[in-house]
Image (cartoon, helix red, strand yellow):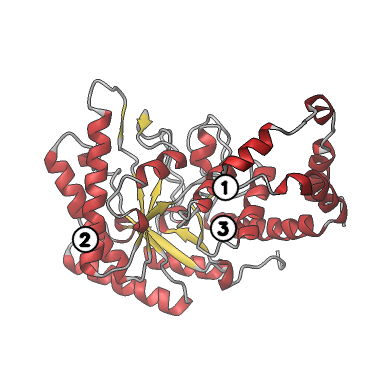
Amino acid sequence: MNTYLPKPEDKFTFGLWTVGSTGRDPFGGPVRDPKTPAELVYLLGEVGAYGVNFHDNDLIPIDATPAEEAAIKRDFRKALDETGLVVPMATTNLFGDPVFKDGAFTSNDPKVRAYALQKTMRAIDLGVEFGAKIYVFWGGREGTETDSSKSAVDSIKRTREALNFLCEYNLDKGYGLKFALEAKPNEPRGDIYNSTTGHMLGFIATLDHPEMVGVNPEVAHEHMAGLNFMHGVAQAWEAGKLFHIDLNDQYPGRYDQDLRFGSRDLKAAFYLVKFLEDVGYSGSKHYDAHAYRTEDYEGVKDFARGCMRTYLMLKEKAAQFNADPEIQAILAEINAEDPALAALFGRYSPEKADAIKALDLDRIAIAKRGLKYERLDQLTIDLLLGMRS
């Protein structure tokens, strides 16, 4: 384990709720004793992480007294200073407390919606206090079990109203935060609004300050719906909206597993890492995942190291892919441009339209061309399995 060690420039981050998970699940109680936020910062410093992120109540319990809050902040700040870790992102827990049983911003009860805004503004203040530049919104309870209960249109409007309000709060306070919306299809609700990254991108365009708002796509959430995560990330990147990213792994169609990055679908993880590295994504790479319930805290450290190690190994494989002569020769062949057609693409003109309509294109001959995708895919497998030097 002495190779592929993380460096600060890798910007690998973990949430307090990830390495701090006690292993509890719906069918069993905790298997690890809880650690304080400061203790978790020291744990992350030991494994070489760059930063730590938190929900408001990961750091400050919802019913903490002012004296308890001050003590927790003091210890947390001391741990950050001593380890050198930073806090790039913060978020609000709008799903755990019983008051949010029917949603937060989309609740039918105006008192709940007011409390959600109050809690979020205070949590934004807390995140900024510790240096956060990105603020994530995950609407875990923003959905329904029965559509008899609320209007989907009203829920969309309420969400828009809340985000517009919070954007103005951000501007009024001069915080300079970027907001990142995180999609999920279901769990803990039967259905969650804005269930995919694509939904979120469409929704952002309707906000008063779309320039302030992007997305925080998560591997597991898109894989739960059977989608290609890298494609969603690519769409967000092309739109200029990839503000943050959550890395983990997931079997399609299962409950939200939050597995160690790359532990389930190594090929999908490879294409994701290759994309992020090829386009030069420079934001945090946040691991929203959990160690197996079988582990003690030494196992949690193994989990955290494994997440980062796998990314770095796949980063090396991506560079190898880009330098492999046979792979690049196939890519050059299948992506070759036709000089005779190059001038016809791009922005429309009547002349181009007439020229394209007049082309003599032999669709039968074109269709007979083999594209070598089988060979290309097997070369990728060979590379991932260490069979190409």
Q: Amino acid at mark 3?
A: Ala
Work out whether 83 lies above or below 362. below
Q: Which residue is mark 2?
A: 169
Q: Amino acid at mark 2?
A: Tyr
- CB under 8 Å between discs 1 and 3: no
Quadrant of the frame with the C terminus: bottom right
Distance of mark 3 from mark 2, alpha carbons? 35 Å
Residue 218 seen in render = yes
Q: Which residue is mark 3?
A: 304
How many marks can you see?
3
Q: Which residue is mark 1?
A: 347
Q: Secondary structure at mark 2?
A: helix
- CB under 8 Å between discs 3 and 2: no
- CB under 8 Å between discs 1 and 2: no
Q: Percent position (x, y) of residue 68?
A: 22, 66
Q: Seen in the image, is 361 located left or right of residue 24?
A: right
Q: Seen in the image, is 362 located left or right of residue 139?
A: right
Work out whether 109 lies above or below 299. above
Q: Residue drawn 81% across and 50% down? A: 332
Q: Secondary structure at mark 3?
A: helix
In the image, which disc is placed on residue 85? Answer: none
Distance of mark 1 from mark 2, alpha carbons? 41 Å
Q: Compare residues 49 and 220 and report the one nearer the observer.
A: 220
Residue 102 seen in render = no
Q: Amino acid at mark 1?
A: Arg
Q: Residue drawn 32% across and 68% down? A: 176
Q: Residue drawn 27% across and 65% down? A: 126
